[in-house]
Image (spheres, rainbow, N blue to C red):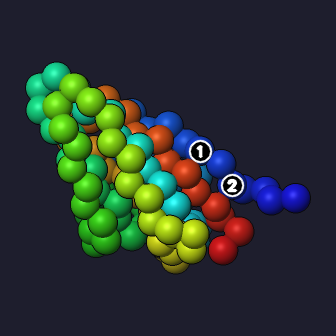
Amino acid sequence: MIQNAGTQLITADGVVLSAARAVRIFTIHIISGAGGGAVVNLRSGSVVGATIWITETGTASTGITFNYGTQGVLFPSGCFVDVDANTTSVAVVYNANT
């Protein structure tokens, strides 16, 4: 049985699962607001100032999915999701059983 895996809905800047815990990200789905395309940064670590590893951009008033393959992307120091004002939500599919 896989534990510590699932989907987390992020609506404001935040950490996936828990701070400073290694996590593998497989997919993110971004919903943008009407004001413009959302910009989402996935940062290595658990704070807003951490190094950006992945930046994805959405389109106004729509959703878009980004897949990172069957192996996903490993964030050994945790993953902080940094969203801009045009981001309505981000669904993050993760596994902490790295």
Is residue 20 visible from the viewing direction of this image?
Answer: no
Question: x, y percentage for residue 76?
Answer: 52, 77
Question: x, y percentage for residue 67?
Answer: 44, 59
**Can you name the residue that lies furthest to the left here?**
35
Residue 91 higher or lower than 53, as above or below:
above
What amino acid is at disc 1?
Thr
Q: In which image quadrant can residue 44 be found? A: bottom left
Residue ID at (43%, 50%): 28
Residue ID at (25%, 60%): 55
**Disc marking residue 86:** none
Q: Quadrant of the C terminus?
A: bottom right
Q: Residues within 10 Å of mark 2 (few under 14, many from 20)?
A: some
The residue that disc 2 covers is 5
In the shown orientation, is residue 6 left or right of residue 89? right
Q: CA distance from mark 1 to mark 2?
A: 7 Å
Is residue 53 visible from the viewing direction of this image?
Answer: yes
Which of the two residues, 58 or 16, is positioned nearer the viewer here?
Answer: 58
The residue that disc 1 covers is 7
Say how many tags the image has: 2
